[in-house]
Image (cartoon, rainbow, N blue to C red):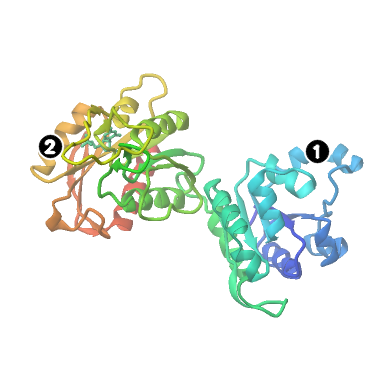
Amino acid sequence: MLAGKRVLLIIGGGIAAYKALDLVRRLRERGCSVTPVLTRAAEHFVTPLSVSALAGEEVHRDLFDLTKEAEMGHIQLSRVADLVVVAPATADLMAKMAQGHADDLASTLLLATDTPVLIAPAMNVRMWDHAATRRNLATLKADGVRVTGPNEGDMACGEYGPGRMAEPLEIVAAVEEALADGPLKGRRVLVTSGPTHEPIDPVRYIANRSSGSQGTAIARALAGLGAQVVFVTGPAAVAPPEGVEVVPVESAAEMLEAVQAALPVDAAVFAAAVADWRVTTASGSKIKKKAGELPPLELAENPDILASVAGLGEGRPGLVVGFAAETDDVVANATAKRGRKGCDWIVANDVSPATGIMGGKENAVHLITGDGVEDWPRMSKDQVAMRLASRIAEALD
Ligand code: C5P
């Protein structure tokens, strides 16, 4: 499946760089072309000659090489590949990527590229555990960068722990996954997920019991089919999936703004449990408790994000999917909701406490489309997500 593909391989300056030589070989064995880039620091660990001999191509090293610039500008170089792989991704390279620095060829290519990026971090365990690296890793993941490894084990520096670069064959597997030509390749899909928090004052809010697990599973499944996913999530109990663009929000108003900014998309799935009301009298400072006195909480209706997107004329996504969490007359209420909201499909589920669905691992849904109602058997939320994602792929085909 790698035959005919091209990887732009950025080799960072760490002891694990020697494994990048084997990675080049493994990729080429599978018919994948490799355009190698070495950082200055990497040249202390592997020579340009051995990298180019294995890659069968010239190594790119200098941002200001006029001869190379005349042959192929660095912006063009950043776009020639199907995937950019950074192996080893040192703590410094990760920091540069997270900050958007562009002070050498590797960091400039990473900032200029619009190609998916996969990194294989490798560093000392304390550097990996450092709060700064944690922050950078979170930023990179939120930017949609894929990450493979690091593995736990003995390190070249004599310590033990996570920080060893993933093995070349593990990186090859991650490259294959990243390049999988799913049916949603080239499609942009929006997913809303999680609850919203509506502030009462700086420390208190109105919320609901949504964990965000169904929306997260849907975003993961869509990304797995090759979609470019924008994941707008309220404060959820579960971590967002990898390989999607994460837009964290708190309130319904923020969610609406993030959704509007994400348009246009080919399909939109509204799995968020948006609070119906917000507090109009939200206080800028903490409301003091006074004996015998209750704070006046005035509520206003939140904007209906799903209905506003489904009602768009120009710029309406090709497919708009809403959710209906009901406790009574699930199908009848959800069918009415489909008409009211103007969406194409409704995924309806029974969230009565006895079902254990809200916050649980399983779901039993009915898919309501223009053609009627399908009752899906009870299955894991991951399975519901995969089934829904493949239905979305079919509908957009
Ligand atoms: O009206 P109700 O909350 O039952 O509708 C549920 C559907 O509408 C879900 O898809 C939810 O994400 C969406 N919704 C929304 N904005 C709101 C309320 C609900 O997008 N303010």
Q: Is mark 1 within 8 Å of ligand 1?
A: no
* Three-letter amino acid code at the position of disc 2: Asn
The C terminus - image quarter: top left
Q: Ligand 1 closer than 8 Å to the CB at disc 2?
A: no
Q: Nearer the viewer, residue 158 or 8?
A: 158
The quadrant of the rendering that contains the N terminus is: bottom right
Q: Of label 1 and label 2, which has the lower sequence position?
A: 1
The x, y position of residue 298, in whole percent, is 22, 28
| Residue at disc 1, secondary structure | loop
- Residue that lies at the very extreme toward the front in this rendered image: 291
Q: Give me the disc on residue 333.
A: 2
Is 202 rendered above or below residue 23?
A: above
Q: Nearer the viewer, residue 199 or 48?
A: 199
Residue at numbered disc 1: 73
Nearer to the camera, 28 or 90: 90
Q: Residue furthest right?
A: 67
Question: Which quadrant would residue 90 be assigned to in this image?
Answer: bottom right
Q: Quadrant of ligand 1?
A: top left
Kindly identify the residue that appears in the image at 47 percent across and 29 percent down. Answer: 261
In terms of depth relative to the viewer, which is nearer, 34 or 112? 112
Using the image, determine if residue 202 lies above or below residue 242.
above
| Residue 168 in the image, given as x and y percentages of width and height | 65, 69
Q: Residue at x 66, y 54 (%)?
A: 94
Give the side of residue 243 with respect to residue 375, left or right.
Answer: right
The answer to the question of whether label 1 and label 2 lie on touching residues, with beta carbons closer than 8 A, is no
Q: Is residue 2 visible?
A: no
Q: Amino acid at mark 1?
A: Gly
